Image (tube, rainbow, N blue to C red):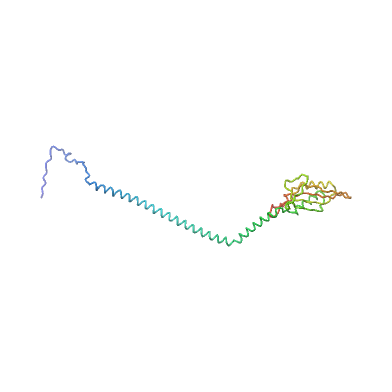
Amino acid sequence: MAQTTLMPLDPALSPQQVTRVLTITADLLPEEVTAARRARKTRGWVLAVVGLVVLALVGWYLVADKGTSDANAELETITAEQARLQRKQTSYGDVVNTQSENAAITKQLSTLMKYDLRWAALLDTVRDTAADSDATVEGISATLTANTGTAATTTTLPSTSGAASVGTITLTGSAPDKPSVAKFIDSLNDINTLANPYVSSVVQQKDKTVDFIITVDFTSEALCGRFTTKCKTGGN
């Protein structure tokens, strides 16, 4: 059995001094080892950052590639729809051409029928006005001068219409007396489609009645037709 010999404590040292551990430290590793460890640590961080950047780029590429694929698919769908519509439009080519021709014809008719008017309605108005004045219209001669290049009839009488004169009407007939003829003239003067009525001749007969000849202009207010200004359904 081994024996342990206890050495007596130095009476000059206290127990605290004997158990005190010195705090002296020293790095005994060579500088090369420390630099190598630091380089490996830095290289690890760099590789980690590069890896994150590469992952981000790969993710962005995948997203962009999917967006491009979706856009190409949508473009193909639109292109196919456009081709279908073009084929469908071609099948209706005759209808489209007919519509264009109808529009061109309507435009030409509007120009050609610029001076169209409802003669029957205008002459009925003249006859009804004469009847209200106790006059009788026995003959009517109407001339449209606006589309012939000739000047319309003008008189020194004032016009009651602001519209331009486009033709003349010559009326022949009879009345009980001259006041009836005057009343007929005044009534014609109140019609907006007529202007400048005047008496060309008044001849008294043996039975005291009078025969008259009246000339009156009709204005652009009387112009109407299917291809121009719509005619009014009512009276003047």
Question: Does residue 123 appear to the left or right of 177 in the view shown?
Answer: left
**Extreme residue in the top direction:** 12
How many discs mark residues in the rendered view? 0
Residue 16: x and y in percent read: 18, 39
**Extreme residue in the bottom direction:** 91
Q: Of 23 and 68, which appears nearest the observer? A: 68
Residue 14, image quadrant = top left
Residue 30: x and y in percent read: 22, 47
Question: Does residue 66 appear to the left or right of 118 in the view shown?
Answer: left
Residue 204: x and y in percent read: 87, 49
Question: Does residue 124 appear to the left or right of 227 in the view shown?
Answer: right
Q: Of 161 and 177, which appears nearest the observer? A: 161
Q: Is the residue 65 above or below the residue 197 in the image? A: below
Question: Does residue 227 appear to the left or right of 19 in the view shown?
Answer: right
Residue 163: x and y in percent read: 72, 47
**Extreme residue in the right direction:** 206
